[in-house]
Image: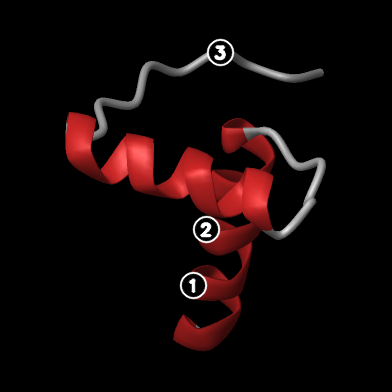
Amino acid sequence: MNEKTTVYIEPDLKEEVKIRLIREKDNKSLSALINELLGEWIKDLK
C-alpha cells in the first residue's frame, strides 16, 4: 500500500525539474522521480 508523505521542494528546483521532465517527454510524476532517486540512493548505501 502506498503511503502519503509531504516533501517540501524549493520552488526554483521544483520548476526546473518539471521543465526537464516535460522537455525530455518523460511521463514520470514528481513522486515517481523521487521514489526512483531514493531507491537508487538506498542501493548505493548497501
Secondary structure under tag 1 reads helix
Left or right for 34, reference 14: right
Circles 2 and 1: CB atoms closer than 8 Å: yes
Q: Nearer the viewer, residue 4 or 26?
A: 26
Mark 3 — residue? 4
Secondary structure under tag 3 reads loop
N-term-proximal mark, 3 vs 1: 3
Q: Nearer the viewer, residue 14 or 33?
A: 14
Circles 3 and 1: CB atoms closer than 8 Å: no
- At which x and y percent is residue 12? 20, 39
Left or right for 10, reference 45: left
Left or right for 19, reference 10: right
Mark 1 — residue? 41
Mark 2 — residue? 38
Name which residue lies at 78% across and 51% down. Answer: 26
- At which x and y percent is residue 31? 60, 33
Q: Amino acid at mark 2?
A: Leu
